[in-house]
């Protein structure tokens, strides 16, 4: 598997947000500010289409790190 870490220095996320972040239409933005589809679409492309895995590590005040694992030989390897 290839491992890709994507880290930011933002405000981080509490447990309630971390549990929902990959759900379709979940957003922490106000009305008319976002669809909440970006992370759920990314998750399903990585997991369903490529046979990989996507994780999130984050704590309030400590930013976030998304970890993506992709099989090196393709989905059927």
Image (cartoon, grey):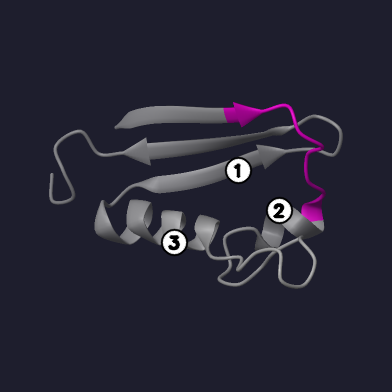
Q: Tag 1's secondary structure?
A: strand
Q: Distance between the residues labelled 3 and 2?
A: 16 Å
The boundaries of the magenta stretch are 7-15
Return the residue at label 1: 56
* Of the image marks 3 and 2, the number of the one nearer the N terminus: 2
Query: Quick check: 73 left or right of 45?
Result: left
Magenta stretch holds residue 14: yes
Residue 22: image location, x then y, percent: 57, 60
Image quadrant in which you'd find residue 31:
bottom right
Return the residue at label 2: 18
Give the label, 3 or 1, closer to the camera.
3
Q: Which residue is drawn at 61% across and 72% down?
A: 25
Name the residue nearer the viewer: 5 or 10: 10
Q: Tag 3's secondary structure?
A: helix
Query: How would you rate the neighbour count of disc 2 (Cα within 10 Å): few for under 14, some for 14-19, many for 20 or more?
Result: some
Counting labels gives: 3
Q: In this view, does 70 lie above or below 29?
A: above
> Are the residues at dot 2 and dot 1 in contact (C-beta closer than 8 Å)?
yes
Q: Tag 2's secondary structure?
A: helix
Return the residue at label 3: 41
Q: How far apart are marks 3 and 1 (CA)?
A: 15 Å
Residue 39: image location, x then y, percent: 53, 55
Query: How would you rate the neighbour count of disc 1 (Cα within 10 Å): few for under 14, some for 14-19, many for 20 or more?
Result: some
Residue 37: image location, x then y, percent: 53, 65
Name the residue nearer the viewer: 18 or 77: 18
Q: Residue at x 71, y 53 (%)?
A: 18
Residue 77: image location, x then y, percent: 13, 44
* Of the image marks 2 and 1, the number of the one nearer the N terminus: 2
């Amino acid at each position: 598997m290839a491992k890709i870490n994507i880290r930011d220095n933002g405000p981080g996320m509490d447990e309630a947000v971390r549990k929902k972040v990959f759900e379709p239409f979940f957003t922490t933005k106000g009305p008319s500010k976002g669809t909440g589809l970006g992370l759920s679409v990314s998750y399903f492309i990585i997991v369903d289409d490529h046979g990989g895995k996507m994780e999130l590590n984050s704590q309030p005040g400590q930013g976030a790190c998304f970890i993506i694992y992709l099989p090196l030989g393709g989905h059927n390897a």
